[in-house]
Amino acid sequence: MKNIVTLLMVLALTSCASTEVIEARKAAIDKADHEECLSFGFTEDTEAYGGCRLTLKSIRAQEENTDALQHNRRVDFRWCRGYYCW
């Protein structure tokens, strides 16, 4: 029951998100990535800096993919297959 309520809340919040909010989130992520790469000692506009940014973006995409797969796995167990439901 908690999962359903949480899912509905997330859907409600994301459906209300305006383009300004989405752009603000992207800008915050971009700024955080920039600062993190600088803190690692990379200089802006270098190949190493670009590699750092690409790596952070790749890590974030992999985490989103993992979260989606885990969510799908939890949802799959709620459905009946054949005569058995779990």
Image: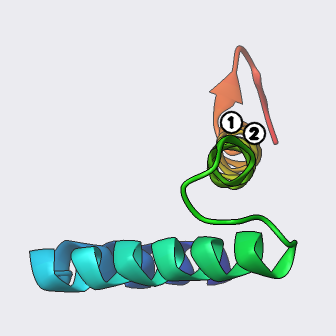
The answer to whether residue 1 of the structure is visible from this angle is no
Of residues 9 and 5, the one nearer the viewer is 9
In this rendering, would 23 be left or right of 48?
left
Q: Amino acid at mark 2?
A: Arg
Do the CB atoms of the residues marked 1 and 2 lie less than 8 Å apart?
A: yes
Q: Helix or strand or loop: what does disc 1 sit on?
A: helix
Residue 50 location (% of width, % of height): 62, 47
Residue 37 location (% of width, % of height): 74, 69
Vertical position of residue 60 compared to residue 12: above or below: above
Q: Helix or strand or loop: what does disc 2 sit on?
A: helix
Mark 1 or 2, which is nearer the eye? Answer: 2
Image quarter hosting the C terminus: top right
Residue at 68 percent of width and 54 percent of height: 49
The Cα atoms of the two marked residues, 1 and 2, are separated by: 5 Å
Q: Quadrant of the rendered structure where residue 32 is?
A: bottom right
Other residues around mark 2 within 10 Å, as few (<14) / some (14–19) / many (≥20): few
The label shown at residue 3 is: none
Q: Which residue is mark 1?
A: 76
Q: Which residue is mark 2?
A: 73
Vertical position of residue 29 compared to residue 48: above or below: below
Q: Quadrant of the rendered structure where residue 85 is?
A: top right
